[in-house]
Image (cartoon, rainbow, N blue to C red):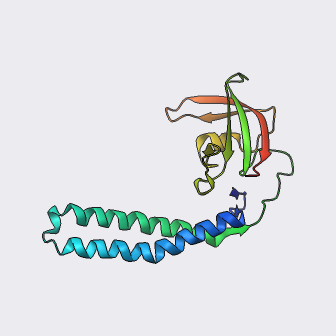
Amino acid sequence: MTQTSENVTWLTQEAYNQLKAELEYLSGPARAEVVAKIAAAREEGDLRENGGYHAAKEEQGKQELRVRQLTQLLETAKVGEAPASADGAVAPGMVVTIAFDGDEDDTMTFLLASREYASADIETYSPQSPLGTGVIGHKVGENAEYELPNGKKASVKILKAEPYSG
């Protein structure tokens, strides 16, 4: 999955099919299951002290949030390959290798993409994460800076950036 500056999310056909299947499951069978759990818990009596009821309601809320996320994502998604960065700059959908503080012995390689495209094969960072926003737009050989959660700045050197072919 790749996001471009026009807020279009590019998905492979496989990723699109997988997300569509998840949406159909969550909107159909999974929704019916959680409604049945809520109904069964309601019949147990006092809702104020009914842990099963509260757990089922929480599950329903999470499920409905995921349905909204998937619906929005699939509405704006385009199936195919994202256009390559014309200037060779780091962009979503690329596998990026960086060196921390310019130390080429302390490196990390990751896929710059959203979590829907994450796999066990490669660590994935969101383009909206601090590291993601810090490296986007930089070219190989350039230094980039991003803000750590504690407010301090960290710098990395872009060693390699290639389109993801997974």
Q: 97 and 140: which one is in front?
A: 97
Residue 16, picture quadrant? bottom right
Q: Position of residue 54 (x, y in %)?
A: 25, 63
Most extreme residue toward the front, as rendered? 121
Q: Position of residue 1 (x, y in %)?
A: 68, 58
Residue at image coords 64%, 49%: 127
Residue 95, located in which quarter of the rendered image?
A: top right
Identify which residue is drawn at 18% across, 64% down: 50
Question: Tag count in the figure?
Answer: 0
Q: Is residue 73 visible?
A: no
In the displayed structure, 152 sits above or below 69; it is above
Residue 136 location (% of width, % of height): 72, 44
Position of residue 97 relative to residue 64, above or below, is above
Residue drawn 70% across the image and 56% down it:
2
Residue 85 vs residue 46: left or right? right
| Residue 37 higher or lower than 4, as above or below | below
In this rendering, does residue 158 appear at all?
yes
**Residue 56 placement: quadrant:** bottom left
Kindly identify the residue that appears in the image at 62 percent across and 42 percent down.
123
Q: Position of residue 114 (x, y in %)?
A: 61, 53
Q: Residue furthest left?
A: 46
